[in-house]
């Protein structure tokens, strides 16, 4: 015995429509026979995840092909200068930067940062090699800046071995490194321009950062202040 889904009147088994409201009557057992199958697949497929090895092969092929083709183009067609060294140096830097993430994720971070610094220094040297008349900037400005930035970046993984890094401690470390880098940068520029060693604009950065450093040290030293800052900033 069945009933109309619209008006609820009792229906006979042979009826195709409700005699009262003319609503079609469907037998659930005959739905597959009356309606054609769906053109879409019922099973959901899943695309295979790309492995790091495949990405590494693709990146190596692209960078190698770019370096080789630019080198051949430089030697055979546009041979007025060795401009291909800039492209080759960029490919080397990109390979070194992506090596820990794609090829070998277990590389210690301090070794990875050191390799990044060396690759950038090599890249700047290749640029200075193309401009021998102005190569003085590399030894007096470019290379020292890379060394300072590499040392600043190495401080974080080295500190993580001895001190737990939090947002406050990382902020303190950053606001100590910023004025140190700015003062070093200004002195290096004065050296390159053969001017007296005297800080001007970096003194402003140094003053602001010193004030922030004292505030952070006070917050870190006082547990109640530290907890209040963490509670208000939600970290």
Image (cartoon, rainbow, N blue to C red):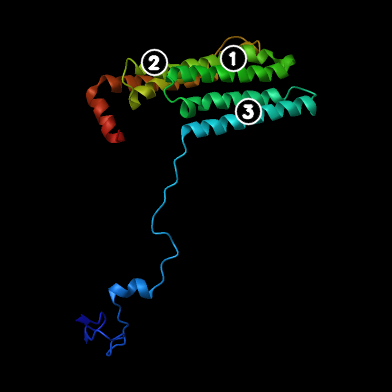
| Position in image of residue 151 (x %, y %) | 48, 15
In three-dimensional space, the C-alpha distance between marks 2 and 1, rounded to whole angstroms, equals: 22 Å
Image quarter of residue 138? top right
Residue at left offset 46%, top offset 28%? 101
How far separated are the C-alphas under marks 3 and 2? 34 Å
Which of the two labelled residues, at mark 3 and mark 1, occupies the earlier sequence position? 3
In this figure, which residue is indicated by the disc labeled 3?
64
Which residue is depicted at the point 61% across and 32% down?
62
User: Dot 2 corresponds to which residue?
Assistant: 158
Dot 3 or dot 2: first in sequence order is 3
Q: Depth-wise, is mark 3 or mark 1 nearer the camera?
A: 3
Residue drawn at point x = 38 percent, y = 24 percent: 171
Q: Which residue in the rendered view is the most extreme toward the bottom?
A: 19
Identify residue for label 1: 143
Quarter holding residue 142: top right
Query: Which residue occupies 46% across, 19% down?
Result: 153
Q: Which type of secondary structure does the marked residue at label 1 adopt?
A: helix
Q: Position of residue 177 (x, y in %)?
A: 45, 18
């Amino acid at each position: 015995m069945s009933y109309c889904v619209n008006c609820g009147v009792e229906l006979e088994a042979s009826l195709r429509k409700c005699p009262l409201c003319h609503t079609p009557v469907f037998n659930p057992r005959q739905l597959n026979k009356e309606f054609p199958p769906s053109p879409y697949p019922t099973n959901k497929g899943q695309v295979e995840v790309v492995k790091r090895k495949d990405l590494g092969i693709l990146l190596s092929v692209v960078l190698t092909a770019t370096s080789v083709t630019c080198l051949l183009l430089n030697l055979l067609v546009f041979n007025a200068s060795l401009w291909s060294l800039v492209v080759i140096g960029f490919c080397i830097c990109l390979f070194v930067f992506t090596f820990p993430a794609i090829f070998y994720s277990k590389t210690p971070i301090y070794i990875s940062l050191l390799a990044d610094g060396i690759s950038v220094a090599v890249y700047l040297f290749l640029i200075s090699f193309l401009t021998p008349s102005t190569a003085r900037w590399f030894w007096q400005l470019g290379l020292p800046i890379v060394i300072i930035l590499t040392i600043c970046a190495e401080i974080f993984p080295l500190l993580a071995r001895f001190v737990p890094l939090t947002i406050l401690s990382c902020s303190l470390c950053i606001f100590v490194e910023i004025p140190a880098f700015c003062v070093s940068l200004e002195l290096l520029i004065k050296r390159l321009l053969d001017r007296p060693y005297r800080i001007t604009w970096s003194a402003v950065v140094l003053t602001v950062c010193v004030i922030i450093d004292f505030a952070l040290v006070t917050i870190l030293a006082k547990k109640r202040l530290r907890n209040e800052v963490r509670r208000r900033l939600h970290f």
